[in-house]
Amino acid sequence: MNFEKRLTKIMRAEAPSLFGPGALTRGNVDRYHLHKLQAALRYAARNSSFYRERFRKAGAAPEDIGTLADIEKLPLTEPGEVAASPFRFLCLSRSEIARVHAFVTSGTTGPQKKIFWTQNDLDRIIRFLAAGIGTVAGRGDVVNVWLPAGLPYGQADLLSRGVKKIGAKPVIAPMDIRSEDHLRLIRESRATVIFGSTRLILRLTRELQYSHDLSRLGVHTLFLTSEYLPPGARTDLQRIWNCRVSTHYGLTEMGLGVAVECEAGDGYHFNEAGLLAEIVDPETGRPAAPGDEGELVFTTLTREAMPLIRYRTGDISRLITAPCSCGAKALGKFAAVGKRLEAIALLAGGEKIHPSLIDGVLMDMPGFVDWQAVIDRRDEREILHFRVELTEPDTGKIPEMKKRLFAIPALAKSIQAGWMAEPLIGIASPGELRGTGTGKRLIRSAG
Ligand SMILES: [Zn+2]
């Protein structure tokens, strides 16, 4: 069953009276969104002390929202506000919370966030994850889930439950599994789909591709999440595994699973049964012009424990409203997220770089496994220090890497103008940059 059909089923179950017997139309979805939005706002104003106060101060009441466009009358919610006082967002008593996800989004920086769920919230997450994984797997598939495991209703467990819902079998791989052991797990479990972070799956591929024929394992889809996948690296993965490569966009605050790439391969259909998406200008917070790039903002429509209204994701994207060539008739899309606001590093000369630019030039280089970068501003000129992991530590590849880095206009310009020294590249030992693969990538500052 395709994604649109599954989402239709979920929406019908959430609001049976709004839908007729026919196929889903955009009009149905808009009507559903307005109905759910109004209910979600009334619920939050009544039950969350944060939103009660927020709406009062803004002079806005849920009753003022008569159309979807009216949502811009409401203030945005900042991630820092959730981190600072999570309990003020709670809409029910602590005894009704079934699960808490506590996490930091970017490696080790930033305050910890806590997101609360009721059992109904968790059940909705699982239903959506089933719809997402259903785009690449079905009955009889074995899905290798490579996500942080442990507690019930943790990431790996939630996806595993979604996998079971579509009649497939989940097999969880430990986050720190060595590549050779992972290969054995894939073989022995007869995995047909691998779901995991882009960075870790690229590492797995590089560490095994020269000693094994990965195209003969029977894996028909790599389903990647967490980080941007540059086009060159995608082609590489498709060729090496001889399989489909699809990507997923997730955000813990929005229910972990948020959006999946469709066969059209250009953008993501998202959880329109549970979320309303907007694009705003990150500087002013005002709605972006239709089709323009800006910050993705989500409003939860069905959340019980902790609704989030106009929540800023920090992710840069744009909405795509043209009909999708995959055949989805009623669902919208947003473009792949290549930039996150907090990951954009401002260089001394005013140029900006972000990790996906570096991924874009380095990740499809033969034998390239992973990188880390630190900007050092302590000297007269800025300098980027790279640690780079290759399948075989080989300083002979440094000139090629430099050449590729110079292909990033912001870096080339800064270096030519003398604002920045040539990057320094150090070769890491195999496995050195492995990490846990759960934090999102940042270019850090030294000193
Ligand atoms: Zn589509």
Image (spheres, helix red, strand yellow):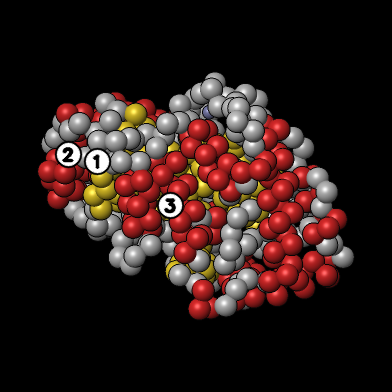
Q: Nearer the viewer, mark 3 or mark 1?
A: 3
Image position, residue 145 (x, y; %): 30, 49
In the rendered structure, find residue 142 and report the number of the disc placed on it.
1
The correct choice, above or below, for 51 with respect to 245 in the image is below
Q: Earlier in the sequence, mark 3 or mark 2?
A: 3
Residue 220 placement, left or right of 443? left
Residue type pointed to by label 2: Arg
The residue under the point 44% across, 62% down is 107
Q: Residue at x 59, y 27 (%)?
A: 23
For the residues bearing labels 3 and 1, Cβ distance under 8 angstroms: no
Badge number at residue 190: 2
Residue 279 position (above or below residue 305) = above
Label 3 residue near ligand 1, CB within 8 Å = no
Q: Residue at x 68, y 58 (%)?
A: 40
Q: Secondary structure at mark 1?
A: strand
Q: Position of residue 233 (x, y in %)?
A: 37, 34
Q: Which image quarter holds the N terminus?
A: top left
Please give the residue where the numbered disc 3 appears in the rendered image. 126
